[in-house]
C-alpha cells in the first residue's frame, strides 16, 4: 500500500502539542488570569530547548567517548558544531526573558498561588543538563536542597546520569591525549631555543620564565598559582582537569594560530561560552524574579532570588579552563617551537 503523504500538522504532532496548555485559572469556578497562558507556553518552550541541548550534549559526548578521536576528520568539527549550537540556544533562552518580562508583577500574582508547590526548580531536564556538562551534585549551591523537590525516580535518574562520564571529564581525557608535548617525538632538537631563553629544561620551564617576566609586581602571587595548577603531584578533590590536561589546554590557547590547533581552541572557547550563556540566563532570571516577587519565597519553597544568586556565583562548570587565561603571555615572548612540530601543526598539501 502507498504510504500517506506526510502533513505538517501530523509530523509535528500539533494536535498533541497545542492541547497541552491548561491554565489553572481558566478552570470552571476560577477567575481567568490572562497571563497564565503566556507563563505556561514560555516554560514549555524552555523545556523543549533543554531537550535539544541535552540531545546535542549526548551526541558530542558520544563522539568524545571514542577510543581514538580523529582531530583531522569530521569528529572534532562535529563536536564543536553541536556545542556551538548549544551556545546559540542559551542566548535564545535569555532572550525569551524579554517576552516573560511583558508580564507585570500584578499579572503574575493573579495566578501565582495556584502554582504551589510547582516550581522551575523542579525541572529535571535542567538538572540533567548541568550533570551531563560536568557539575557534580556536591558542588552545587544548596546541594542538600537541590533534589528535595524531585520524585524518587527523578533522583535516581539524576544519580545514574552522574555516574556516566561527563562532557568535562571527556574533554579532560581528550586533552590528556594531545601528542604535541611528546618530548621524544617533537622536542629532541630543541636545544637552541632553550639556550636563548637562558633556561635549561622542558618547554614549560622556559615558558614559566617568560610568563614570570610579564607579571606586574602585584601579580606575583600568580607564580604560586601557576605551580599549583600544573603540579601533577598535588591532590585536589574539587579539581576536574588534570595537570596534564591543563598544560595541553594552555598550549592550545597559546599557539592557536597554527591550523592544527584552530578546532581544539574553538572547542575550549565554546565550553567557556556555554558557561557564560548559563550565567547570563541565570542573571536575567534573577532580575525577572526580583522584579516580579521581590524578596518573597519561591513557589517551590526556595529562598527565591537569594538561591538564584548563590547558584549563579557557584555553578561555573568550566572554571578550570577559564582560569588558564591567567597564565597567558604576549606573543612576543612565546618560546619558538621545534621545526618538526611547526611542520606538524601547519597545513599539508
Image (spheres, rainbow, N blue to C red):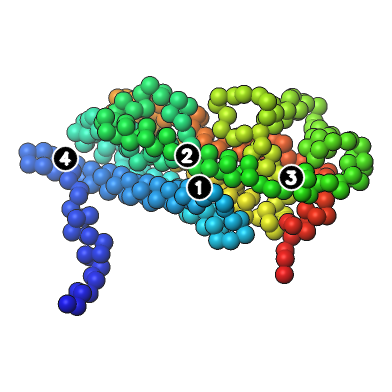
Circle number at residue 65: 1
Marks 4 and 2, the one that precedes in the sequence: 4
Mark 1 vs 3, N-terminal side:
1
CB under 8 Å between discs 1 and 2: yes
Drawn side of residue 343 relative to residue 137, left or right = right
Per the image, label 1 sits on a secondary structure element best described as loop
Mark with earlier residue (1, 2): 1
- Identified at 21% across, 45% down, the residue is 34
Which is nearer the N-term, disc 1 or disc 4? 4
Residue placed at 55% from the left, 61% from the top? 74
Callout 1 crowding tier (Cα within 10 Å): few <14, some 14–19, many ≥20: some
- Disc 4 and disc 3: Cα gap in Å? 64 Å
Residue with the most extreme bottom position: 2
Query: Mark 2 vs mark 3: which is more N-terminal?
Result: 2
Q: CA distance from mark 1 to mark 2?
A: 8 Å
Residue lying farthest to the top in this orientation: 144
Is any part of residue 201 visible from this angle? yes
Q: Which residue is mark 3?
A: 182
- Percent from the top left, x then y, of residue 263? 62, 55
The alpha-carbon separation of the residues under discs 2 and 3 comes to 26 Å
Q: Which residue is mark 4?
A: 24
Q: Which mark is residue 165?
A: 2
**The C terminus: image quadrant:** bottom right
Look at discs 4 and 2 and give the one toward the viewer: 2
Q: In the shown orientation, is residue 140 left or right of residue 197?
A: left
In what element is the residue under mark 2? loop
First in residue order: circle 4 vs circle 3: 4
Viewport quadrant of the N terminus: bottom left
Give percent across and percent down for residue 333. 83, 43
Q: In screen coordinates, is 60 left or right of 334?
A: left
Residue at image position (66%, 24%) is 234
Amino acid at each position: 500500500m502507498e504510504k500517506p503523504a506526510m502533513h505538517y500538522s501530523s509530523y509535528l504532532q500539533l494536535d498533541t502539542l497545542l492541547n497541552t496548555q491548561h491554565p489553572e485559572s481558566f478552570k470552571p469556578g476560577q477567575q481567568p488570569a490572562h497571563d497564565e497562558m503566556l507563563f505556561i507556553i514560555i516554560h514549555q518552550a524552555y523545556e523543549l530547548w533543554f531537550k535539544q541541548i541535552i540531545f546535542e550534549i549526548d551526541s558530542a559526548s558520544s563522539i568524545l567517548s571514542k577510543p581514538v578521536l580523529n582531530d583531522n576528520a569530521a569528529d572534532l568539527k562535529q563536536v564543536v558544531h553541536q556545542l556551538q549550537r548549544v551556545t546559540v540556544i542559551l542566548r535564545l533562552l535569555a532572550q525569551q526573558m524579554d517576552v516573560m518580562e511583558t508580564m507585570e508583577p500584578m499579572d503574575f500574582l493573579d495566578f501565582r498561588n495556584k502554582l504551589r508547590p510547582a516550581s522551575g526548580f523542579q525541572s529535571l531536564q535542567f538538572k540533567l543538563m548541568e550533570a551531563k556538562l560536568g557539575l557534580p551534585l556536591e558542588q552545587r549551591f544548596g546541594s542538600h536542597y537541590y533534589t528535595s523537590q524531585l520524585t524518587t525516580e527523578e533522583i535516581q535518574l539524576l544519580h545514574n546520569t552522574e555516574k556516566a562520564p561527563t562532557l568535562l571529564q571527556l574533554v579532560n581525557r581528550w586533552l590528556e591525549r594531545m601528542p604535541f608535548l611528546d618530548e621524544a617525538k617533537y622536542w629532541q632538537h630543541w636545544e637552541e631555543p632553550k639556550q636563548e631563553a637562558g633556561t635549561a629544561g622542558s618547554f614549560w620551564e622556559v615558558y614559566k620564565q617568560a610568563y614570570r617576566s610579564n607579571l606586574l609586581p602585584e601579580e606575583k602571587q600568580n607564580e604560586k598559582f601557576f605551580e599549583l595548577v600544573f603540579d601533577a603531584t598535588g591532590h585536589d578533590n574539587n579539581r576536574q582537569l588534570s595537570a596534564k590536561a591543563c598544560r595541553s589546554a594552555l598550549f592550545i590557547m597559546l599557539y592557536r594560530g597554527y591550523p592544527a590547533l584552530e578546532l581544539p581552541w574553538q572547542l575550549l572557547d565554546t565550553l567557556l561560552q556555554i558557561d557564560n550563556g548559563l550565567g547570563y540566563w541565570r542573571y536575567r532570571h534573577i532580575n525577572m524574579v526580583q522584579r516580579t516577587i521581590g524578596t518573597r519565597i519561591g513557589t517551590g519553597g526556595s529562598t527565591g532570588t537569594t538561591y538564584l544568586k548563590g547558584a549563579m556565583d557557584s555553578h561555573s562548570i568550566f572554571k578550570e579552563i577559564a582560569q588558564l587565561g591567567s597564565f597567558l603571555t604576549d606573543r612576543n615572548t612565546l618560546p619558538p617551537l621545534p621545526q618538526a612540530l611547526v611542520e606538524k601543526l601547519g597545513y599539508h598539501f
